[in-house]
Amino acid sequence: MWKLVAVYFLIQIGFYGLNLWLPTLIQTLTQRGFVAVGVLAALPYVVAGFGLWFNGWLADRTGRYALHVFIAMLIAAISLVGSVLVGHAYIAISMALICLAMGGALAYDGPFWAAASTTMPAAVLGGALGLINALGNLGGFVGPYVGGYLQDASGGSFVGTAAFLAAMLLLAGIVMFSVKADRPAQPKRQPG
């Protein structure tokens, strides 16, 4: 259970840091006004909606929940850093990477909670899931706070913030591999 708390805490650092600083990142990247930034900031959540569905569906088919959390975190981390490194040179590519980063940062959700529910006995599951949620959500404070500090320290550059958030997401995926939460894949039905 404590490993799951750590994973959820790290994910919340990365996700809420990205979520809070997303409009600032898009505005810095595109140099557009509030309306354009608002419209562009909606695009990553459209991708995230698809990522949530697809990753959950695929994880249920394979039964490899930890792997699907790791893949989502890996995609988020690489895409976030890539979007900042590409930056102003290729705005469309940078926006596509931001969309992938948000998609990965949210696509962990179904496989993570399915994994959490397979690791503990039913008698303690409700309390354990509540504890994971309560302690893990403290990362929702840490991510935006550290992100703001790093931006202030760097004179407004998002590179350090992106690297920190990406490192937290990647670390969450790595820690998730140490959780034994996979179940056997669904057997294929025989016709007839």
Image: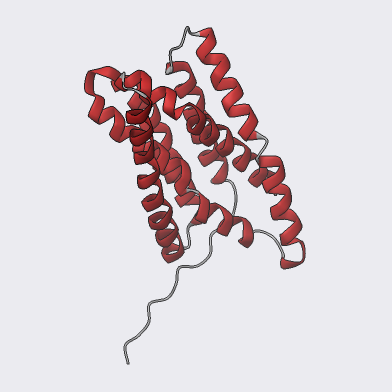
Give the residue drawn at x 77%, y 66%: 123
Give the residue drawn at x 63%, y 60%: 117
Eyeballing the image, is 42 above or below 184?
above
Q: Is 1 situated left or right of 64 in this image? A: right
Quadrant housing the C terminus:
bottom left
Q: How many marks?
A: 0
Eyeballing the image, is 145 above or below 109?
above
Eyeballing the image, is 151 above or below 83?
above
Give the residue drawn at x 49%, y 34%: 19
Residue 6 sits in quarter: top right
Q: Position of residue 53 (x, y in %)?
A: 41, 57
Q: Is 65 situated left or right of 132 in this image? A: left
Q: Would you say residue 142 is visible in this rendering?
A: yes
Question: Foreground residue, 155 or 101?
Answer: 155
Question: Foreground residue, 155 or 55?
Answer: 155
Give the residue drawn at x 46%, y 40%: 105
Q: Position of residue 125 (x, y in %)?
A: 72, 61
Residue 134 sits in quarter: top right
Q: Position of residue 9 (x, y in %)?
A: 63, 38
Farthest bottom residue in view: 192
Q: Would you say residue 181 is visible in this rendering?
A: no
Colour option used: secondary structure
Q: Position of residue 161 (x, y in %)?
A: 49, 20
